Image (spheres, coloured by chain):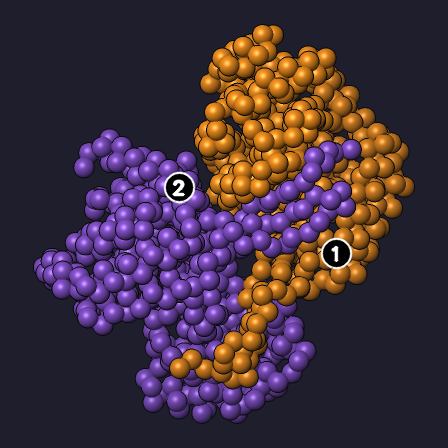
Chain colours: A orange, B purple
Amino acid sequence: MTTSSLHDTMQTIGQQAKAAAKAMRAVSQQQKIKALLYLADKIQENADYLKAENAKDLAAAKENGLTPALLDRLTLSDKSIQTMVAGVRQIAHLDDPIGSLSSTRILPNGMQIAKMTIPLGVIGIIYESRPNVTIDAAALCLKAGNVAILRGGSEAFYSNTALASLIKEALAYAGLPDAAVQIIPTTDRAAVGHLVTMTDYIDVIIPRGGKGLLQRLANEAKVPLIMHLDGNCHMYLDRSANLDMAIELAFHAKTYRYGICGSLETLLVHQDIASQVLPTLAQKFTEKSVEMRGCPRTLEIIPSATPASEFDWQTEYLAPIIAIKIVDTIEQAINHIEQYSSGHTESIITEDMHAARQFQLLVDSAGVYVNLPTVFADGFEYGLGAEIGISTNRLHARGPVAVEGLTTYKWVLTGDGQMRS
Amino acid sequence: MTTSSLHDTMQTIGQQAKAAAKAMRAVSQQQKIKALLYLADKIQENADYLKAENAKDLAAAKENGLTPALLDRLTLSDKSIQTMVAGVRQIAHLDDPIGSLSSTRILPNGMQIAKMTIPLGVIGIIYESRPNVTIDAAALCLKAGNVAILRGGSEAFYSNTALASLIKEALAYAGLPDAAVQIIPTTDRAAVGHLVTMTDYIDVIIPRGGKGLLQRLANEAKVPLIMHLDGNCHMYLDRSANLDMAIELAFHAKTYRYGICGSLETLLVHQDIASQVLPTLAQKFTEKSVEMRGCPRTLEIIPSATPASEFDWQTEYLAPIIAIKIVDTIEQAINHIEQYSSGHTESIITEDMHAARQFQLLVDSAGVYVNLPTVFADGFEYGLGAEIGISTNRLHARGPVAVEGLTTYKWVLTGDGQMRS
């Protein structure tokens, strides 16, 4: 596409999205449920078609030498299609947050005031290889009354286009605006640059993908982004921790799944219990082939660990590697977290009420846990339903961003002709 | 200041602010109240000193030919000093939002989850001539546990420096970090450019001032801004409006105070009642010397009005001028608002439940009123207390931004060693 025709295409998409956002404000809860349930049915019915289109992407990806991990993410299997179907049905049946009132009060002059939950507006989603994000993102955005502009990875172009055609059918079936979900119809990388700067049409962008993509977007964006760059999560084993729990939770937090952003990356251990918990933990990690990188005092207790450097405290491994540091006090643990955390999720293991309170008050991350592994950072686990991502922003949604995070509010005031004095 | 020394100064301010934000998380409610009440006392005691410093600014301003309106804003009078003192005392006694828990639930596996209200962090305030903003902004930021970096207008440099010295005393007296409130110690305009891009240190910027300043900041900023560019507010007089109320509220909404952002700028009138309300309204506006600019049908009813152009529908006059348009239906009114509104505040005057519901659901502004004048858009009127500004953002705080709008939340989870299955 030429530069000017790409510009025009993106402007048209933006204008259509803005118009659709207006129409979505008048849509009923039933219409949204109808569209979502129909979409789930259509995905199920069209499994073979989806796999055939996906096969085109897979063939091209193999030719382009994509890694097995990327090929795996790109694949639409019977199982991943069933997961999409179940996910959309679940979203359809979530409580609808739109129009609910909170902070309702009567003011001294008799006016009634409330905050009404409303859709966020037009949401841009930028993502990489997984085609299921097309469905998950569209369904969540729709449920909250939003309009979605989806920009998937070029390697999933055929899969995403096929999924988009089913979404269009579902929108039409339920009488929702055709432009409530739009897929950017080009693999031109410059389209993303347009998307993140179209402040006239797009209210927020939720990017998902590798750190390279996210950092580039954060630099370029004029539209607000909801995202997290890193999940450098910490667990602190307090001097008063239940030792068995400390060992179990640290092991679970690291090994539950290495690739999720809530996975434990740096373990902080109070000096008083280090020699009691670290040998057993080291044995468990070694059995699981988890590489340990420790501070000098850790190396004295775990000779098989390698020395940790500044790099290790800063790094989200997303891999079977863990950094371990022994601290003198809870304050040292909190300071370490203050310095190195990406603000995602941290946990203290302790039996001491005061230590728990201190940690939960002073640690400044989106999730701060007591006696729980950091891997609970997930919309379903929080009881919020499907999530579209996890935010380490300070404004708006923090932590798992689910339907509620895709809404905002307006103030509604109702009176009887009151005037200001 | 040289470019590199300004850069160093700003970096130091940022680092100090970040460190102070950490310290502020451990501060008690009592300490904040103590600091604020002491500050109020100090302002009162030092009224003469403040007026003397303010006189230096006024002298320079007169030499530089500032307009009488700007001189008025710049002046610290006995009355404006008393208003500051009363404002700080009021803020001191507001409910403290920090640490409060909401959405508290026990999840199926027994974990407890809640959202804890926490300070937003480091807040940059950029403002123009009014020195009282130095105190109002510092007090509101402090009350919510935030750290403030204040950048006032160069024309108020002596006044702001004097006020800052009192703030420093109050911080020290209550044991709050010295850098909890910092004033940028230079009138160099380039400092603002640093401030709005220091994403490592500043969490949000709240700019106050003319549209020129705000537009420039919106273009340059990398730090999120909480602000509104325009308050192009609408009132729609529905066909079923109580005619007396319609006339009273339209007149009040325009004439209560011309210079506030909630002031009415465009009046939309249903064709069925236009000939009943507009002649009386025109007479009242004429008596008050409010200039009327109308659509062709309005001109038939109000011959003294001048023709409105596209410019008028787009414009926030902040002056004794009103644009008037007759519409065929409520849908036309809503569409006009959709097209021209700046998303600030709109109102419908109607006795019809359905029209009221339709308007409040479909109009997408920060404030949507029924049978109330738009001039209620104010933190005090909403029962929120002193406001630091009004936001037309879609993310985070919308409408009047008071103490609550200067907070965010984190998820706190407490368990007994639960693990993910």
Q: Are marks 2 and 1 in contact (CB under 8 Å)?
A: no
Residue at the spot of label 1: A95
Identify which residue is drawn at 19% across, 34% down: B2
Is any part of residue A26 visible from this angle? yes
What SS does tag 2 mark? helix
Residues behind callouts 2 and 1 on a single chain: no
Q: Is residue B79 left or right of residue B393?
A: left
Which of the chains bears the disc numbered 1?
A
Q: Is residue A68 left or right of residue B223?
A: right
Q: Nearer the viewer, residue A276 or A114?
A: A276
Give the image location of residue B265, x and y in percent: 43, 73
Circle 1: is it few (<14), some (14-19), or many (20+) Cα within 10 Å?
some
Is any part of residue B316 visible from this angle? no
Give the image location of residue B388, x and y in percent: 39, 60
Residue at the spot of label 2: B23
Q: Which mark is residue A186?
A: none
| Gap between marks 2 and 1 measured at Cα | 40 Å
Seen in the picture, residue A97 relative to A282 is either above or below; the reply is below
Identify which residue is drawn at 55% across, 84% down: A416
Q: Quadrant of residue A44?
A: top right
